Image (tube, grey):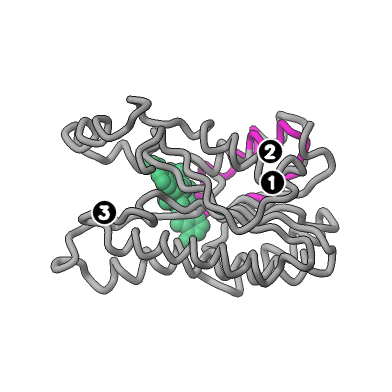
Amino acid sequence: MLLKERVAIVTGGARGIGREIALLLAREGADLAICDVNEVVLDATKKEVEASGRKCLAETVDVTKADQVEDFVQKTLDKFGKIDILINNAGITRDGLLVRMSEADWDAVLNVNLKGAFNCTKSVAKIMMKQRDGRIVNIASIIGIMGNAGQANYAASKGGLIALTKTVAKELGSRNVRVNAVAPGFIQTDMTAKLSEDTKNTMLKLIPLGALGTAKDVANIVLFLASDNSAYITGQVVQVDGGMVM
Ligand code: NDP
């Protein structure tokens, strides 16, 4: 068990990659605090975490709202007494070409993917600094590294998240708080299920390993970055993309 007696927060933990991360961290011994805007699946994931023998706090929280995040972090602290791990996973897409992209779609994506991570990081940073221990993993995307036509908002948010990762790693390193990012490529989830077969086939041709990744592939590297096995690693971006970007 790599995370025995650890306490982890996973945002957007109800379904998709966040759910997979929550379940893996629980199997490795961590108690979980998961938050999401999707109340229905949130409860199902809470039950799955508890079925693996761990405690789980599950709250409906919109990560774009600083007051809701503060409240959730306080509840986590009250229930578990500490916070060792934060996984900033909540993310959305609102795709469209730049010239047709509405201000609302730009704001929505930047708010969830970047400001949401800022709100959560700021809230747990004070606690982790006091503890002189903490691990933060931000779920970015290879789109934040390479850009992608039709995803100006998403690419900017994920590129910003990578910059945030490096900055916070520099600010908190002296307090033994490590901050890293994972940049998944194309992963089989509801988010990518929306893509057309044409788009998927075009993407597959760009992936040397010749397949889409799975949520488990992402969760495995998150586990490594959240555990003591990565004790000397901070400020890094680890790509999980089948070799798509190199
Ligand atoms: P999903 O849409 O499957 O899951 C995201 C979860 O986050 C959903 O439960 C969603 O709720 C929740 N969420 C959305 N907005 C908020 C909010 N404001 N506050 C709290 N929770 C929220 O996405 P994935 O699992 O595919 O993606 C997870 C992360 O991985 C994202 O950051 C994404 O950008 C990143 N990623 C995904 C890739 C992929 O191929 N799937 C590739 C690269 C990166 P609801 O159900 O209501 O939408």
Where residue 104 appears, as percent x and y from the top left, is 29, 71
Secondary structure under tag 2 reads helix
User: Residue at position x 84%, y 43% from top?
Assistant: 5
Q: Which of the marked residues, 3 or 1, is nearer the chain's N terminus?
A: 3
Asked if one can make out residue 135 in the rendered structure from this viewpoint, the answer is yes
Residue 148 image label:
3
Q: Amino acid at mark 3?
A: Asn
Distance between the alpha carbons at the discs numbered 3 and 2: 31 Å
Q: Where is 49 relative to 148, above or below?
A: above
Secondary structure under tag 3 reads loop
Q: Amino acid at mark 2?
A: Leu
| Res 207 quadrant in image | top left
Asked if one can make out residue 35 in the rendered structure from this viewpoint, the answer is no
Distance between the alpha carbons at the discs numbered 1 and 2: 9 Å
Distance between the alpha carbons at the discs numbered 3 and 1: 29 Å
User: Residue lying furthest front in this view?
Assistant: 246
Residues in magenta? 23-48
Q: Which residue is mark 1?
A: 226
Q: Which residue is mark 2?
A: 25
Secondary structure under tag 1 reads helix
Q: Nearer the viewer, mark 1 or mark 2?
A: 1
